[in-house]
Image (cartoon, rainbow, N blue to C red):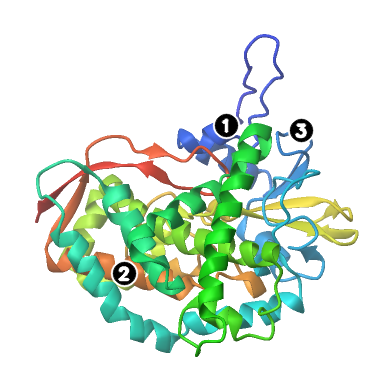
Amino acid sequence: MATLATETAAPGSMSIDPLDVSRPELYRDDTWHAPFRELRARGGIHYHDNTAFGPFWSITTYKPLVQVESLPDIFSSEAGGITIADMAEGDIKMPMFIAMDRPKHTDQRRTVAPAFTPSEMVRMTDNIRMRTAEILDSLPVGQEFDWVDRVSIELTTQMLALLFDFPWEERRKLTYWSDWAGDIEIAKDPVRKEERRQILFECAAYFGNLWQGKVGKEPTPDLISMMIHSDAMNHMDQMEFLGNLILLIVGGNDTTRNSMSAYAWGLNQFPEERAKLEANPGLIGNATQEIIRWQTPLAHMRRTATQDTELDGHKIREGDKLGLWYISANRDESVFADADSIIVDRENARRHLAFGHGIHRCVGARLAELQIGVLMEEMAKRRLRVNVTGEPERVAACFVHGYKKMAVELSHY
């Protein structure tokens, strides 16, 4: 395999480390494949000593990533947070259960888990199908429009509004807050950091009013009511409340939104696989898993070593930061043959790590799968095909792996 050549930055600046997979332009330009391929070829575990996010270990292959996720007491989510961006002095500290260790993580996760049980999925399916049908029936056939805005964002934002019992006419606030909260690049910019602080406090105040409106009322199936009626979460301070809200908003928004966009973009790149799916809608369940694998809408999570340990022969020191690159593990050829391709009938598509692994596996995974699957089913019912008409505009960041805009036209097949 060819080795990546050292790139040279502009005169007077530092040279670029071609294996630094935290660089935002890799994701903006969709050129992240090569450095990850090189890292996997070198064994999958690599120490970066000089990045914009400080030094960290990259874990880029399937087996060691699963090993780290399976040892949450050694590799902590709480010690340094869940992204490779470190907390700086004066930053807002927003505790959230995904960034907690046991036992507190277990208690808080258990509070919201009932919103995502199989029986809840059955209860919500008709509503999801109805809203998906309404959106698809409103789209122009043969005219260009932005798939991200009209379909991906709208469907996921509607779902979040229902989950939170959020005022319907103001539901796009959820998208706005999610985009600000999930932007890892803001960590490098003090001005935007302060702007985000103000925006997230507005979010906290808004949800604080929703909370107050439900205090003393009978339980309802929305997430805020579940928190109020839970011993594990009803005494949260404002920052912990905000942290858990942001977790649920970003988790519920970005994963599903960007996989829905990947359905449009990805199948456009693999027309033979699209034809296979169009000819056999029975493949939709498996294709849903494959598209989530292929996209991997959250590129990484971070863990911090709580003690000196060893990982596949590498000495990890207490306090070391590890970037778990799901985006790369899901392209590990030793697990997924022809991993860069979408294969709608891939036999092991469900083995993907896009939702994480172990105690922190995405609590809303079933809901994401349901929403994406229903979208594909309703498209199939209408015999609608998405034709991408230009290169999409992508998110320039190494955390949320997604799309900002995507021009498409619909046609019938």
Image quadrant occupied by the N terminus = top right
Residues at marks 3 and 2, CA–CA distance in whole angstroms: 41 Å
- The disc labelled 3 sits on which kind of residue? Asn
How many residues crowd around disc 1 within 10 Å: few (fewer than 14), some, or many (20 or more)?
Answer: few
Between disc 1 and disc 3, the foreground one is 3
Name the residue that disc number 3 marks: 50
Q: Nearer the viewer, residue 31 or 404?
A: 404
Q: Quadrant of residue 404?
A: top left
The tag earlier along the polypeptide, 3 or 2, is 3
Name the residue that disc number 2 marks: 373
State the image coordinates of residue 272 (x, y, percent, origin top left). Answer: 23, 53
Q: Nearer the viewer, residue 232 or 323?
A: 232
State the image coordinates of residue 383 (x, y, percent, origin top left). Answer: 12, 62
Q: Quadrant of residue 392?
A: top left
How many residues crowd around disc 2 within 10 Å: few (fewer than 14), some, or many (20 or more)?
Answer: many
Residue beneath the point at 62% across and 83% down: 110
Instruction: Name the secondary structure under disc 2.
Output: helix
Image quadrant occupied by the C terminus = bottom left
Instruction: Name the secondary structure under disc 3.
Output: loop
Examine the rendering and report whether any part of residue 347 can be seen: no
State the image coordinates of residue 315 (x, y, percent, origin top left). Answer: 86, 53
Residue beneath the point at 35% across and 85% down: 122
Residue beneath the point at 39% across and 66% down: 167
Name the residue that disc number 1 marks: 2
State the image coordinates of residue 314 (x, y, percent, origin top left). Answer: 82, 52
**Left of 397 or right of it: where is 266?**
left
- The disc labelled 1 sits on which kind of residue? Ala
Mark 3 and mark 2 in contact? Answer it, CB < 8 Å: no
